[in-house]
Image (cartoon, rainbow, N blue to C red):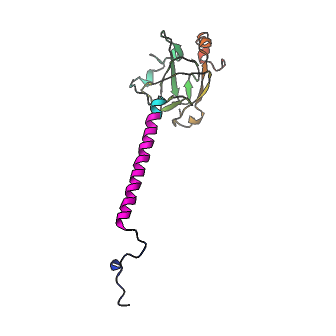
Amino acid sequence: MADVPSTPQQPLSDGIVPEDIVARTENRWLVVMVAMLGVMMAIIVVTGIAGALHPSSNVEIVDPLSLHLQGEFVESNLGTALEPDGTATVRIIAGQYDFIPNCIQVPTHTPVKFRLTSPDVVHGFLLPSTNVNTMVVPGFVSEVRTSFPAAGEYQMPCNEFCGLGHHAMWAHVTAVPKERFANLTPLERTSCAAR
Ligand code: CUA
């Protein structure tokens, strides 16, 4: 037993990969990983630009405690308004646990600007199959712009956990043909019945 060497002095047995090959393999993996990262970054940037997906870039503050008393978000000013330049502005309050108003009609083939704010906690505003997806933060006005190329109905879920009623915080946006929208009364523009 005396001629058995201690473990560190044993020569490498057959099958252990030489150091230069290990280094070469690791370098190849490094290149593959960096390339994958590059591709994923490119996908994010390209889809972001092509689909106009971006967080709202405006920083606009509003007093969440007096929304219902004064300013842009008083009840009579909520819903869809046609601007003199032909575009539409939709004003919505997202609160626990509903959107006010929770049914919205918008015209097709028209630039639509959504302006939202919250009186209580953070909510999320999402229109599936569109570029609209924003957080609604109390104290700030979230603004997102889009347009609806075809008539149709969009579910409008709150996609930011906001409390026990979060799962039930849903509403509707209905895109109605531009000509028909012009004939809707202000009440009909926020009515669920007119769908
Ligand atoms: Cu509002 Cu979740």
Measured as percent of width and height from the top left, residue 182 is found at 59, 10
Q: Is residue 24 magenta?
A: yes
Q: Quadrant of the C terminus?
A: top right
> In the rendering, at what x and y percent does residue 38 appear?
41, 43
Q: Residue 127, image x and y in percent?
A: 55, 29
Left or right position of 75 against 13: right
Q: Residue pushed farthest bottom?
A: 1
Q: Is residue 159 inside the magenta stretch?
A: no
**Number of on-image labels:** 0
Residue 146 lies, in percent from the top left, at: 50, 23
Q: Is residue 182 visible?
A: yes
- Which residue is more in the foreground, 195 or 121? 195
Overall secondary structure of the magenta stretch? helix
Residue shown at 45%/42% (left/top)? 40
| In this view, 106 is above or below 5 | above
Location of residue 42 (image quadrant): top left
Using the image, determine if residue 12 lies above or below residue 167.
below
- Residue extending furthest toward the left: 9
Going 39% across and 58% down the picture, which residue do you hit?
26
Please say if 188 is above or below 45.
above
Residue drawn at x 37%, y 59% as measured from the top left: 24
Q: Quadrant of residue 49?
A: top left
- The answer to whether residue 136 shows anywhere in this view is no
| Range shown magenta | 18-46
> Is 88 drawn above or below residue 144 in the view shown?
above
Residue at x-position 37% and y-position 56%: 27
Where is the N terminus found, in terms of image quarters?
A: bottom left
Residue placed most toward the observer, 166 or 110: 110
